[in-house]
Amino acid sequence: MMASPRKLKILGIESSCDETSVAILSDEDVKVNLISSQHFHKTYGGVVPELSSRAHLQIIKPLVDSALESANLKINEIDLIAATAGPGLIGALLVGLTFAKGLSYSLNKPFVSVNHIEGHIYSGFLMDKKPEFPMLVLVVSGGHTLLLYVESFTKIFLLGTTVDDAAGEAFDKVSKLLGFGYPGGQQIETSALKGDEKSIKFPIAELKDEYNFSFSGLKTSVLRFVQKNFTNRNIPEIDLNNISASFQKALVDALVQKVNFALQNHKVKSLSLVGGVAANQKLRNELNNLADQFKIPCIIPSLSYCGDNAAMIALRGLQLFKSGVRDSLRAKPYPAIPQNHFLRLSNS
Ligand code: KG4
Ligand code: ZN
């Protein structure tokens, strides 16, 4: 009997914002996915870049050691090292990226730099039931809202994006103005569960560019509603819950409308919802229902793979490695998605 080929052991590192994460994969199987969240940013109402970098620096080495221990591996048994290079906070990225490059150099093991958004895009492949190409992907995170037609592991077409705030950013801003604090998605969702989503009608932006999103008007109308109806932001709990539920409904409706429109115009074999806001149960339910109507599977990562995590970075690193990519130790961090990074598909 032929021995089956040895599985590749991939070490993934993510440090683009306020989560330090280290994962180890054995081929595509996640052996360990450790996530250390920097909760102290809550005090400041948002992520403080300099504090974020310092916290990454303190935790990165112990986290890599813990991950190796949990996976029962020695560092020299790792075959490939993958780290996020961008987009994100430069100082934060620099910590994970430099640490990964240092390991690659000292162990003489290949290194692949990963685009964080591509990590999210293909994160559905971490699940047992994999997406099928071509797939439509909705990326909803704190920094990005993207609707994508994904043809393969290398061909990603951009259909639409937000013209102002990202979906997660809208959750966070409304959360702040309702007094729930930062980050706000989870807190709005909890409050919304106790509210009536039909109690207030917040508007959904009508944009000429059919696949683009806009959320700043929605945020402003929540602000106006609060200013008009309550003095000094003194909002009784019942109203807080109704505002949360009505805001969440408007935002989810806006997302679902565009996905529906894209599914009508593009024949795909699967739908995938990814990114931090994909943790939202209402959005998960509605996209699952929509996919059912189109008779295609909807792949949504489990909660630990929705927010920032290194498992998705290791997996994307493996996909790139298999397609021949090897990065030099000169790879630099970058703050934003490079221009024209995604291909353009005509919106028809
Ligand atoms: O992907 P992610 O962890 O970080 C970025 O790359 O931005 O996304 C974080 C975002 C935050 O804006 C947070 O409020 C939002 O995801 N979020 C949620 C929920 N959980 C996290 N939004 C809505 N509902 C949730 N349950
Ligand atoms: Zn992210």
Image (cartoon, helix red, strand yellow):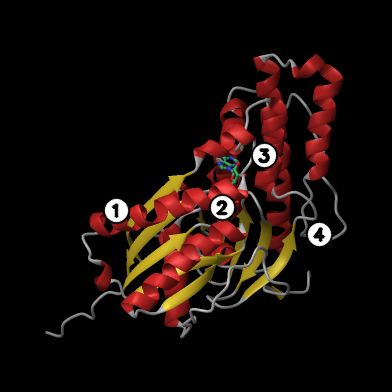
- Nearer to us: label 1 or label 4: 1
> Does mark 1 have its CB less than 8 Å from ligand 1?
no
Q: Are the residues tagged 2 and 1 within 8 Å (C-beta)?
A: no
Label 3 is placed on what type of residue?
A: Phe
> Which tag, 4 or 3, sits closer to the chain's start?
3
Residue wearing tag 4: 210
Residue wearing tag 1: 66
Q: From the viewer's perspective, tell me whether residue 325 is left or right of residue 212.
A: left
Please tell me which residue is depicted at 35% across the width and 69% down the height of the picture.
10
Q: How far apart are marks 4 and 2 (CA)?
A: 31 Å
Q: Distance between the residues labelled 2 and 1?
A: 21 Å
- State whether residue 58 is above or below residue 210: above
Q: Is residue 289 visible?
A: no
> Which tag, 3 or 1, sits closer to the chain's start?
1
Q: Quadrant of residue 5?
A: bottom left
- Nearer to us: label 4 or label 3: 3
Q: Are the residues tagged 1 and 4 within 8 Å (C-beta)?
A: no
Q: From the viewer's perspective, tell me whether residue 245 is left or right of residue 231.
A: left
Label 2 is placed on what type of residue?
A: Cys
- State whether residue 187 is above or below residue 98: above
Residue wearing tag 3: 171
Residue wearing tag 2: 17
Give percent across and percent down for residue 7: 27, 74
Label 2: state its secondary structure: loop
Label 4: state its secondary structure: loop
Give percent across and percent down for residue 335: 65, 63
Split into quadrants, the picture shows ligand 2 in the one at: bottom right
Q: Which residue lies furthest to the left in this view?
A: 1
> Which tag, 2 or 3, sits closer to the chain's start?
2
Please tell me which residue is depicted at 59% across the width and 75% down the height of the picture.
151
- Nearer to us: label 2 or label 3: 2
> Does mark 2 have its CB less than 8 Å from ligand 1?
yes
